[in-house]
Image: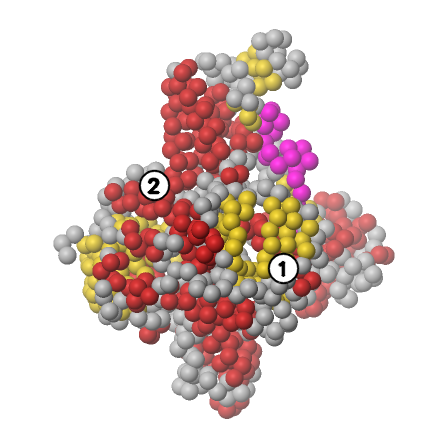
Amino acid sequence: MKDAIRIQGARENNLKNVTLDIPKHQLIVVMGPSGSGKSTLAMDILQRECQRQYVESSGISAESIAKPNVDSITGLAPSISIGQHVTNRNPRSTVGTITDMYTYLRTVYEKKGVRTCKFCGESISPSPVEVAGESMKCPACSQPYMPLTKADFSFNTPSGACSTCSGLGIIVDIQVEAVFNKEKTIREGAVTFWYESLTDYQTNIIEAAGKHYGLDMSGPLHSFSPIQWELLKHGVESEAFACHFPHIEPPKTVGKGRFKGVLTAMWQKYKERDGQSSEAAYFTTQSCPDCRGDRLKFESRSVTVEGRTLPSLARCSLEELNDWLLAVHAKSRMEGDMILLAVLEELLGKIKRVILVGLGYLSLDRQMITLSGGEAQRLRLASILGSGLTGVLYVLDEPTTGLHPKDTDGLIEVMKELRDMGNTVLMIEHDTRVMQQADHIIDIGPGAGRFGGEIVGQGTLKQLMEQSSSVTGRIVRAQSRIQSKCRQGNGDVISIHEATLHNLKQISVSFPLGSLISVSGASGSGKSTLVFDLLANASDGGGRVEGCREVIGLNKVNSVITVDQSPISRMQRSSVATYTDLYTLLRKVFASLPAAKARGLNEKYFSFNSPGGRCEQCEGLGIVEVDMHFLPHLRVQCPTCHGKRFIPEVLAVTYDDYTIADILELSIEESLSLFKDHKKMAKLLKLLCDVGIGYFQWGQSVTTLSGGEGQRLKLARELSAPANGHTLYLLDEPSSGLHPLDVHKLYILLDKLVDAGNTVILVEHNTDPIAASDWVIDMGPGGGNSGGQVIAAGTPEQIVSSEASCTGIYLSI
């Protein structure tokens, strides 16, 4: 192929000497069963080699970036990878700030904002021509005012932020009474969140500090004087404590009593980890009493344009904001304000692109840390669309995740626009609608892990359906759209009455128990609010929850298990094996081997998370970070253990010729036969395969998992626990990221759960699982304020026949 990226002899991970031509300037879909090699091809070969060549061409040594295991790659272009991991954890970053939409809106308020005179109450309109540093006057009382600048409308600048909350809109504080048990001594565990070994360590430091200052810190807390409390809470370096001992220098070392203070250390951790520290449960947040969540100082938050304040617009959905801006644009055109028109047109263009990718329900003040991976990815995609770049290779990881089929159409249009600008758009995707619109599909399979890694089909979707080797073509051909027979349930229901939380319009809805139920609807229509914010929280609160009159029927189930897509952990040390307790079982197996006993190696030596048997150069991670200066840090193989994680003595112990490091490199599916005689381990391994994650490696960090993958891992762990009677399972898009073949396997498992007397409720967009449900509750008709209603409820057949349902249209396709 003349105008193409040519890959020859690719053997990275599980790819089997793949040679492939990828046509340029086309919309390309890479698909196949989970673990078949899609991400290896897209990310580990194409994206990494693009990065390596870029670094090399910049005159920087690219030795630290491993060259993919491939004979040659030609025809590459500069690449931009858009994944689903939310990396921005700054609470100050919002949808508005990250896209610059808020910046443009601040300009509108700078140019058109009307103030109210605080002396006479008269409106003060901006002057047509303002001179920098020159004041303006109230037309009624002539009181002078300095013009407000763009910075005055930013909650991230001192001149614009509310001084009480520093522009965050909330006040964070520690529940001090929950931190300390006044009846105990420090050594007895008076600091409630310190575990035993940490209590001993910290008590020694506090007692050394007390000795340094002549204070006895060994008594129960209720006997402490204000000075002792100050030492315990804020440490030896706090001014409030130091002022009592002006002639005593603080201890120089921790061993001599340089104690930081319990509350001081808590605040430090909280800020360093963006509120995600282990002590986060001891912190409370409430709306700022001064700005009431508006974030801006009084002068700025009271300015209006066409009767609306800036904070009120920041809370609107983007669809509502778009309508308001169109009205302002029309008025500005009539007034001939060409400068403002240019700003408005740029802002409207940005909003239009975000709406096109199905995110019109978001608001400008929505924090980035609250977005799902799919939402963050599409937001970045919308921003890139406005950049005007050409000749670029875009690599996307499942951009339709979390999208209703009607929103997928808008996203496809964005992809086509990128392609038509002269770019190559390559995406890992399983959505049938995207496949139908793709110029070229690369089907990888036929299975996962060592059973995959081959190109089993190429071409358009129609061509794939004619290729006998194509796994995708075979599945698409065999798909049946509507469940022929639905379970009737057990006769009991859980009912939510008069729900008004967020955008819900005082709705009442019932969930038939003993059924597989799908809650569908447009993005932002209220599905998650209904299932997770109301139903799940009502189960925690004994049937009582804010946002609805009542929830009835929870007494009909024994337990409620919520499995969402929130990250399992942001600790790189947490792996698939450690999270599921597989690793505990594995360490027991290795510690019981004769070779381990002969060397005196117990279970602790086979842990990569504690000293003893692990490599201390990389602390058991197998990788180390390299500072790339102006590029993100790069992780490379540890030069001491060569990625093996352990010291040679531990690696000398083998099970069936496998070291513990070898097993950590195996996929779950590959290890099934290896541990078939260990019943508990074999059962857990099979369960992981049943939920569609058999391609995971034992040692794979949970930080690398997408939201959908993490959810299926959580589901497997929940299902491995002993049964507790009738269980209600609440799942958030469990089919996210799954090939149709894997979706089929997952739903066989969910069907078994329901047949065993349980109830499963899914928030779902994928039309195949919805069609296979017993009961469907369709929300809408749109997102944000346009949603919040139950449009239709019934069996899949009834949803198809409903004229109001936008989901039914796609179920019948």
Q: Which mark is residue 345?
A: none
Give left or right: position of 529 versus 425.
right
Residue 412 visible at all: yes
Image coordinates for residue 688, horizontal then vertical, percent: 47, 72
Give left or right: position of 80 versus 129.
left
The range drawn in magenta is 282-302
Q: Nearer the viewer, residue 703 or 654?
A: 703
Q: How far apart are marks 1 and 2 (CA)?
A: 47 Å
> What residue lies at 47% left-to-right and 76% top-to-bottom?
686
Q: In this view, does 234 lie above or below 107?
A: below
Residue 13 visible at all: no
Q: Name the residue under label 2.
A: 385
Image coordinates for residue 386, horizontal then vertical, percent: 34, 38
Image coordinates for residue 619, horizontal then vertical, percent: 49, 68
Q: In which quarter of the image is residue 357?
A: top left
Q: Is residue 425 above or below residue 166?
A: below
